[in-house]
C-alpha cells in the first residue's frame, strides 16, 4: 500500500508545444511518444531533439517525463533497434518507460535497471494478482484497466505496494484496455502497433435482438470525465490521474490539466469541494470537447447503457482559452573549453549586459553529483560550469566550432537564451559532439535550478539470435480444441486422431452450466474467464477446479499469477492475448511455467516461421475474438436477463460480427465476421516446427465440428489442401499487420 501519496496529474503530449502547455498548466508529468514503438503511430510524436528539449523543460521545473514504448515488438525490432533507441532517452534523463510487450519489460529490467518501468493499460491488469505479478517483475507503476470500479482499485491498492495510475479524462476504448483486434482483422491496421482505425466509432445495426437500439453506434463510448470523482479516486489509492489525448491540441491538454490539478490539490488536502467551483471546472472541461457527451466510466457501474454514445460518435469541441507559455527569458553566454589532456568544460554565465534590470537571490556555491559547480558572479549573476571527460588529440583535426556552436546554443528551454558561444580550444582537440550536447543539457538544468539525472551506464546489450529455421518439434504433435457448447464438446471428445495427442478445453461459461459428471475423469482443461475480476460476487472454486480439470488456459498475467498462487502445480497454456511476438517474449513466458503458448494471430507466415515455435499452438480454425467488452450488447438492446445469447453487429458493408455474452463472468466477446481457416496450410505450419495446432469453436454445430476436424485429418495424413465449405478468411497468415 502506497502511503503519503502525492496525486500526480499526468498529461499527454503529441508535440513539444503541448508538452510545455501541460507543464505550465500544472501537470506533474507528461507522457509522449517518440519516433518508434508508440501506441499512437498517427500522432505527430516527438523527434529525439524535441524529446530532449521537453525533458529539459520539464526537469528544470521539477516535473517528470514518460516515454510510451507500448506497442508489441517483433524479434528483429526488439533485438536490433529498441536498445539503442531507449539508450538515447535514458541518457537524456527520461524518468520512466511505459511498456506493453513482456519481452521488452525483461530487456529494460536487465539492461536499464535504473529506469522506472510503468506497465501499460494494454496489459489489462484487472486484479491484485496482476499487480503483484508486475511488482515482482520490478515495475514501479501499473496503469490499471479502465473498466475497474472504485472498490476494485481500492482492493488492489490495499493488497499491493505499487503505484496505481488511473485514467481520469478523455476517450475510452470499447474493448478492455485497448486489447482490440477489430481494426487489424478488418483492414490490417493493428491497434497493437499504434495504428487503430477506430472501427468502434463506425455505424452498426444490432440484429437478432428482441428490441432495437435507439442509435447506430453501439460500440462508441462517451468520453471519460471524472472531475467529480477525484477525491474518491485518491481515497481508493490512485497515485496518478491520467489524461488521454496525445492527438489533442495544446489548449485542450492545458485546460484539462489545470482542472485536474485543482481537483487533485483539494483531494490531497482532505477538504470538501466547493460545489460551485467544481461545477464551473466541469463546464470548462466539457467545452474543451467530448465524444457524444461525458461519463464517469466504470467507477460506479459495471456497464451502464448510458455510457454508450448511441447516436453520435464525433468529437465536438468549443474553443478553449489559449495557453500562454511566456516566461521571463534569461540571456546567457556559453563558453566551451577544450584543452588536450584536460577535462572538457562548458560554462554558462548570465549576461550582465543583456540582463541589466534582473536581480538574483544569492545562493551558496555547490557541487552536484561531482559534475557541476554553480555560483554567482560578483555582480550577482548566475554561473554554472560542467566538467566532462579528459580531451584526447584528434587523429584528423578539423574545425567543428560552427557545429558545436549550433548544438550548444540550442538550450532546450524557453527560460534561457544562449546569445553567444565562446571557444577556448586547442586546434588538435578531439571533441565528441554527443558529449558536448550532454554537458550542455546538464549545464542548462543546473543553471535553471533543475536536478541533473545521473545514472550508471546501461549494461551492454546481448541480443537473442534470430531462429533462421524453426526448431522441429520432438514430441508427439498436439491438437488443442476449445468449446463453448455441449454439442461441440461431445464431438471433440469423440475425436480420436491417429498420431496426435488431443487437449480439450471448456469455456468457463460451459463449465458453470453443465453437470460435473460430464467433466469429471475426462482429463479436460478449463479456460479461465477471459477477464479476471472478482467484483459482482464472482468467485472461483479452486478445489473443484483441481478436482475436475488437469490443466488450464489463461488469458492474462493476472491469471498466470492466480494459477501460480492459488492453483499451484496445475499445467497452463497461455492464450494469444498473452502476447508473444518475439522469441524474447516467448522465453520469458515459458520461464513463468507455461506448458505451451498460443501464437499471436497478427503475425504472418514469414514472421511466425522465424520464431521458435517448439512450444506454440498455431490456430488453424476459429473465429478470432476481436473485442472483449464490459459493455453488454444484449443488455443494451434487450435488458439484462443473465441469459447467454448471440446478437449480430452488422457494419455498413454488410459484414456480421457475432457478439456472445458470457454471464458467469459478465463479459461480452465480439468475434470476427468470418472464421479464420488455415486448414489448407497445415504442411506449412508443420514446417514451422509448431508444437501443435488449435481449433476454437464458437457458433459451429456438432456436425460442423466433426467435418472441420475430419478435413484437418485428411490434410495431415494424405497431404491434401482441403478447406471447409463455408466462407472463411486467412486472417493475417498472408498479409500480416501494420
Image: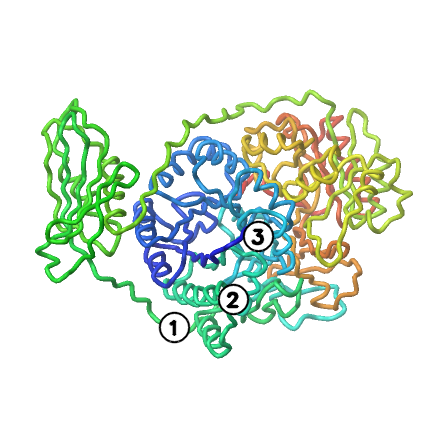
User: Does residue 603 appear to the left or right of 679 in the view shown?
Assistant: left
Contact, mark 1 vs mark 2 (Cβ under 8 Å): no
* Coloring applied to the structure: rainbow
Badge 3: residue crowd in 10 Å (few <14, some 14–19, many ≥20): many
Contact, mark 3 vs mark 1 (Cβ under 8 Å): no
Q: Is residue 572 above or below residue 668?
A: above
Q: Which residue is mark 1?
A: 319
Dot 1 or dot 2, earlier in sequence: 2
Badge 2: residue crowd in 10 Å (few <14, some 14–19, many ≥20): few
Nearer mark to the viewer, of 3 and 2: 2
| Element under disc 2 | loop
Q: CA distance from mark 3 to mark 1?
A: 31 Å
Nearer mark to the viewer, of 1 and 2: 2
State the mark number for residue 144.
3
Dot 3 or dot 1, earlier in sequence: 3
How far across and down, in percent of the image, does residue 466 sit?
Answer: 51, 26
Q: Is residue 233 visible?
A: yes
How far across and down, in percent of the image, does residue 288 sit?
Answer: 43, 70
Q: Which residue is mark 2?
A: 270
How far across and down, in percent of the image, does residue 644 sit?
Answer: 78, 58
| Element under disc 3 | loop
How far across and down, in percent of the image, does residue 156 sit?
Answer: 62, 51
User: Does residue 520 appear to the left or right of 392 in the view shown?
Assistant: right
Say which of 684 and 434 sits in front. Answer: 434
Q: Is residue 730 visible?
A: no
Q: Is residue 153 above or below residue 226?
A: above
Badge 1: residue crowd in 10 Å (few <14, some 14–19, many ≥20): few
Quarter of the figure with residue 711: top right
User: Looking at the image, which residue sits at the far right?
Assistant: 517
Q: Residue at x 22, y 51 (%)?
A: 363
Q: Residue at x 66, y 46 (%)?
A: 624
Amino acid at each position: 500500500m502506497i502511503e503519503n501519496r502525492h496525486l500526480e496529474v499526468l498529461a499527454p503530449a503529441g508535440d513539444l508545444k503541448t508538452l510545455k502547455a501541460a507543464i505550465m498548466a500544472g501537470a506533474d508529468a507528461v507522457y509522449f511518444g517518440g519516433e518508434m514503438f508508440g501506441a499512437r503511430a498517427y500522432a505527430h510524436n516527438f523527434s529525439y531533439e524535441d524529446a530532449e528539449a521537453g525533458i529539459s523543460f520539464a526537469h528544470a521545473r521539477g516535473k517528470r517525463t514518460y516515454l510510451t514504448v507500448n506497442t508489441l515488438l517483433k524479434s528483429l525490432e526488439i533485438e536490433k533497434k529498441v536498445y539503442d533507441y531507449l539508450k538515447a532517452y535514458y541518457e537524456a534523463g527520461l524518468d520512466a518507460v511505459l511498456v506493453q510487450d513482456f519481452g521488452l519489460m525483461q530487456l529494460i529490467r536487465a539492461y536499464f535497471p535504473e529506469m522506472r518501468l510503468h506497465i501499460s493499460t494494454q496489459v489489462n491488469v484487472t486484479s491484485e494478482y496482476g499487480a503483484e505479478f508486475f511488482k515482482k517483475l520490478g515495475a514501479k507503476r501499473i496503469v490499471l484497466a479502465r473498466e475497474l470500479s472504485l472498490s476494485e482499485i481500492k482492493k488492489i491498492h490495499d493488497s499491493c505496494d505499487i503505484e496505481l495510475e488511473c485514467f481520469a479524462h478523455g476517450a475510452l476504448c470499447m474493448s478492455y484496455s485497448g486489447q482490440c483486434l477489430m481494426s487489424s482483422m478488418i483492414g490490417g491496421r493493428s491497434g497493437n502497433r499504434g495504428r487503430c482505425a477506430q472501427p468502434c466509432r463506425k455505424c452498426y445495426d444490432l440484429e437478432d435482438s428482441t428490441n432495437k437500439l435507439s442509435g447506430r453506434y453501439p460500440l462508441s463510448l462517451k468520453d471519460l470525465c471524472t472531475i467529480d470523482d477525484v477525491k474518491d479516486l485518491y481515497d481508493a489509492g490512485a497515485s496518478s490521474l491520467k489524461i488521454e489525448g496525445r492527438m489533442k491540441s495544446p489548449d485542450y491538454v492545458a485546460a484539462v490539466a489545470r482542472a485536474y490539478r485543482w481537483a487533485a490539490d483539494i483531494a490531497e488536502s482532505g477538504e470538501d469541494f466547493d460545489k460551485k467551483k467544481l461545477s464551473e471546472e466541469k463546464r470548462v472541461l466539457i467545452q474543451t470537447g467530448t465524444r457524444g457527451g461525458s461519463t464517469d466510466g466504470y467507477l460506479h457501474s459495471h456497464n451502464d447503457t448510458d455510457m454508450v454514445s448511441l447516436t453520435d460518435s464525433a468529437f465536438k469541441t468549443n474553443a478553449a482559452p489559449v495557453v500562454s507559455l511566456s516566461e521571463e527569458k534569461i540571456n546567457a553566454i556559453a563558453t566551451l573549453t577544450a584543452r588536450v589532456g584536460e577535462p572538457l568544460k562548458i560554462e554558462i554565465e548570465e549576461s550582465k549586459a543583456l540582463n541589466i534590470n534582473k536581480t538574483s537571490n544569492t545562493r551558496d556555491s555547490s557541487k552536484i553529483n561531482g559534475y557541476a559547480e554553480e555560483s554567482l558572479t560578483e555582480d550577482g549573476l548566475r554561473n554554472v560550469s560542467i566538467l566532462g571527460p579528459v580531451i584526447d588529440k584528434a587523429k584528423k583535426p578539423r574545425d567543428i566550432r560552427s557545429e558545436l556552436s549550433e548544438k550548444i546554443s540550442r538550450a532546450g528551454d524557453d527560460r534561457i537564451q544562449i546569445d553567444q558561444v565562446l571557444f577556448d580550444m586547442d586546434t588538435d582537440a578531439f571533441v565528441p559532439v554527443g558529449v558536448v550536447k550532454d554537458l550542455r543539457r546538464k549545464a542548462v538544468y543546473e543553471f535553471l535550478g533543475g536536478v541533473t539525472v545521473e545514472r550508471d551506464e546501461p549494461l551492454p546489450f546481448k541480443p537473442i539470435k534470430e531462429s533462421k529455421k524453426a526448431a522441429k518439434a520432438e514430441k508427439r504433435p498436439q491438437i488443442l480444441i476449445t468449446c463453448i457448447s455441449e454439442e461441440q464438446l461431445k464431438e471433440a471428445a469423440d475425436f480420436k486422431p491417429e498420431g496426435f495427442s488431443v487437449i480439450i478445453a471448456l469455456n468457463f461459461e460451459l463449465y458453470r452450466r453443465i453437470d460435473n459428471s460430464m467433466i469429471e475423469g475426462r482429463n479436460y482443461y478449463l479456460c479461465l474467464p477471459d477477464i479476471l475480476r472478482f467484483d459482482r460476487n464472482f468467485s472461483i472454486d479452486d478445489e473443484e477446479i483441481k478436482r475436475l480439470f488437469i490443466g488450464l488456459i489463461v488469458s492474462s498475467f493476472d491469471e498466470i499469477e492466480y494459477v501460480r498462487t492459488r492453483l499451484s502445480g496445475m499445467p497452463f497454456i497461455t492464450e494469444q492475448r498473452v502476447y508473444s511476438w518475439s522469441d524474447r517474449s516467448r522465453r520469458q513466458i515459458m520461464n513463468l511455467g507455461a506448458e505451451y503458448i498460443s501464437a499471436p494471430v497478427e503475425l504472418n507466415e514469414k514472421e511466425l516461421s522465424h520464431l521458435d515455435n517448439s512450444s506454440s499452438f498455431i490456430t488453424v480454425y476459429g473465429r478470432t475474438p476481436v473485442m472483449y467488452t464490459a459493455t453488454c450488447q444484449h443488455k443494451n438492446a434487450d435488458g439484462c436477463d443473465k441469459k447467454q445469447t448471440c446478437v449480430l453487429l452488422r457494419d455498413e458493408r454488410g459484414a456480421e460480427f457475432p457478439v456472445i455474452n458470457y454471464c458467469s463472468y459478465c463479459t461480452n466477446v465480439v468475434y470476427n465476421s468470418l472464421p479464420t481457416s488455415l486448414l489448407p496450410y497445415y504442411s506449412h505450419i508443420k514446417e514451422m516446427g509448431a508444437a501443435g495446432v488449435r481449433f476454437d469453436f464458437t457458433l459451429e454445430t456438432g456436425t460442423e465440428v466433426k467435418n472441420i476436424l475430419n478435413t484437418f485429418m485428411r490434410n495431415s495424413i494424405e497431404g491434401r489442401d482441403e478447406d471447409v465449405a463455408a466462407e472463411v478468411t486467412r486472417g493475417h497468415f498472408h498479409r500480416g499487420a501494420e
